[in-house]
Every structure is written in structure tokens, then in C-alpha cells.
Image: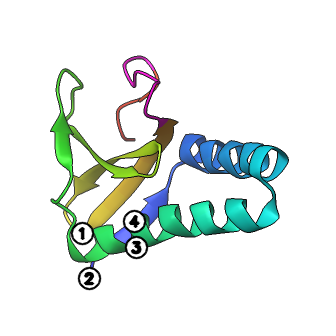
Amino acid sequence: MIDVVVAAEAAADLDSILGFSVATFGETAAARYFDLIERTIARLRDFPDSGMLYPGIIPPVRYVAAGSHRIFYSRTGDMLTIQRVLHQAMRPHGRIAPPA
């Protein structure tokens, strides 16, 4: 089974998304949206190579959509690292560091 690790930057992204969503859309909508993101991450355990390769980032990084956000991740063996969770309008270049 694939282990999923959430990098500190991605955890901060998730906190920010939740805070913004609660303030803007209310707790119920924010909980529903956050659940969508969590289910998308959980699905990556079963289908870790399902994401699209994002061009121009070395080492290779994949992403999947979750609502208006993209979940950027890398895989090394049985370890999947969620690197960032960025709004679709944000360019990931310069925001994603190579995995440690």
C-alpha cells in the first residue's frame, strides 16, 4: 500500500483553503469542499499514477484536480508526498520544491 505524506507547505495550503472557505462560504460548504479534497488525496493511494505530469518541474510532479484546486504530488516507491494544494489560477513554478 502507498503511504501518503503531506508536506508542511501542503498542510499550510490546506489550512488556508479551509479558513478562506469558512469565512467566504460558511462552515457547511467549507466542510463539503474540504471533504472533496481529502477524498481526492485518499484516492491517490489506490491510483498513485493517475495524475497528469506537470511539465517543466524537475523532478517530475503530478497533479489531480479537486474542485477549484490542484493537488501536486510526487511518488518515490511506496511513498506519495503531497507537495502543494494550489488554486487552479496559481502557477506552481517556484512554489514546489524538490522532495527531500
> Where's residue 47, x and y in %?
20, 70
Which image quarter is the N terminus in? bottom left
For the point 38% across and 54% down, the residue is 81
Q: Amino acid at mark 4?
A: Thr
Q: Nearer the viewer, residue 64 or 67?
A: 67
Residue matched to label 3? 42
Residue matched to label 1? 78
Residue matched to label 2? 1
Counting residues from the start of the chain, the first of labels 1 and 4 encountered is 4
Q: Amino acid at mark 1?
A: Asp
Counting residues from the start of the chain, the first of labels 2 and 1 encountered is 2
Residue 28 visible in the current orientation: yes
Residue matched to label 4? 40
| Span shown in magenta | 87-94
Q: Nearer the viewer, residue 19 or 79?
A: 19
Q: Disc 4 versus disc 3: distance between alpha carbons?
A: 5 Å
Q: Secondary structure at mark 1?
A: loop
| Circles 1 and 4 in contact, beta carbons < 8 Å | no
Is residue 19 within the magenta segment? no
Q: Would you identify the image quadrant in which residue 45 lies? A: bottom left
For the point 62% across and 50% down, the residue is 14
| Circles 4 and 3 in contact, beta carbons < 8 Å | yes
Which image quarter is the C terminus in? top left
Q: Disc 3 versus disc 2: distance between alpha carbons?
A: 12 Å
Q: Disc 1 versus disc 3: distance between alpha carbons?
A: 14 Å
Counting residues from the start of the chain, the first of labels 2 and 4 encountered is 2
| Circles 1 and 3 in contact, beta carbons < 8 Å | no
> Where's residue 5, x and y in %?
46, 61
For the point 78% across and 43% down, the residue is 24
